[in-house]
Amino acid sequence: MKRVFWLLSGLNRRMMKLLFALALIAYIACEYIDLILLSIQENGDVKIEQKIDEAVAPLREKIRDLEQSFSQKYPPVKFLSEKDRKRILITGGAGFVGSHLTDKLMMDGHELTVVDNFFTGRKRNVEHWIGHENFELINHDVVEPLYIEVDQIYHLASPASPPNYMYNPIKTLKTNTIGTLNMLGLAKRVGARLLLASTSEVYGDPEVHPQNEEYWGHVNPIGPRACYDEGKRVAETMCYAYMKQEGVEVRVARIFNTFGSRMHMNDGRVVSNFILQALQGEPLTVYGTGSQTRAFQYVSDLVNGLVLLMNSNISSPVNLGNPEEHTILDFFSPPVNMLSSVPKRIRLNPNAYRGRAVSRSQIQFLSEAQDDPQRRRPDIRKAKMMLGWEPVVPLEEGLNKTIQYFSRELEHQANNQYIPKPKAARMKKGRPRHN
């Protein structure tokens, strides 16, 4: 017992010494601060108020930033009653087309869940909706099952440009097969309607012109583009199998070439390639002779078509595209002459092009890509007659908007502002990282 008291008294003595030392340090610190304050007042060099203001200024800025973040302004959103408001899932909703579809459906007043694994999608495409009560963003790969309650599913998830879908063919196939299977399973469980964003690539290199929905296509099943072409064909097959066997409501949109803002600058498509090269004053690259034809629609026209199709009673495939056909070389000569839409003030190399027809010496002809379709033009009579839809944005107007967007992106990069870079489409040795 005495030993215990002795230990306690020893501990008390140590505690007393420690407390005394702390008190002594606090006293010295107070005296030192008083001396500093006294010297400041005596010398009159720096006022205390000024020092306080300097210390508080960063805090004020942080408070101001927080206030602005809490009072974020969203685009105008229509109010819908409970019976009219739908719970909508968009897979690939942070991508080029998906983000524009997100904007329309949000502004129409619906509740949206956007799912994206950000392989080609970018969070900043939808960041202006983050925090809104009707919007939710989920980082998720559709190859894995998803369990949520929805009324409609827009299934857009898939890399769509050749460099991106060829970068990892197995991943592209998985997304278009297993991913579609998962979304159809979700639609079956919750009784939702599903719209599949299919593609004109299901027609392959067509032998019928223009292409209507009854054409079965001409596709190379083992070529470099097959992972995407056949993946979409299988996805369509799955949709109609679920419709016939399980009663799932499906809609299939066969989308033709589309362009507009939020495209990746290096996605390898015709419009983005030419605009970027024109703005930077680089040689214009054409694959093959340039006699291949394409039909281009602006993204807002496509989004309107997708919404009309989703809310229609048409379960068979529908072409959504612009029936105006142009050769690749048409972009450099009247009446299209895309480069005349590039204002001199935003060209990085103003002397490269002067809005005139481009001479062949300014074009770099490269070998033609394997299985590249020679002619592409949609027959949209079905969409016109049954949806009342057709493109309304003229090609020149759409190009002007897209050029302005690309020029802003390049200006941001030139000013060293942070812009997330698209993933490079290149082949790697060994096992790909997106399997």
Image: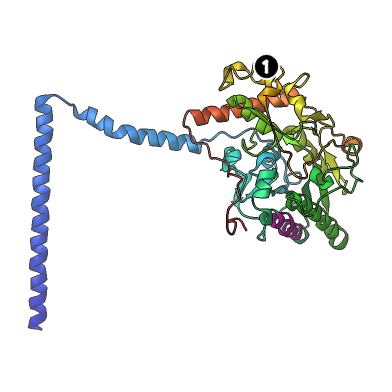
Quarter of the image where one finds residue 10: bottom left
Residue nearer the viewer, 409 or 284: 284
Q: Residue at x 88, y 46 (%)?
A: 314
Q: Residue at x 46, y 31 (%)?
A: 416
In the depicted structure, whether residue 393 falls above or below residue 113? above
Residue 422 placed where, x, y %? 58, 41
In the depicted structure, whether residue 347 falls above or below residue 18? above
In this image, 158 relative to 43: left or right? Answer: right
Residue 91 placed where, x, y %? 68, 49
Residue nearer the viewer, 56 or 430: 430
The quarter of the rendered structure image containing the N terminus is bottom left
In this image, 389 relative to 184: left or right? Answer: right
Q: Identify the residue at the far bottom of this view.
A: 1
Residue 288 placed where, x, y %? 75, 35
What residue span does the magenta drawing correspond to?
A: 173-187
Q: Residue at x 70, y 44 (%)?
A: 162
Instruction: Say which residue label 1 marks.
Output: 355
Residue nearer the viewer, 329 or 79: 329
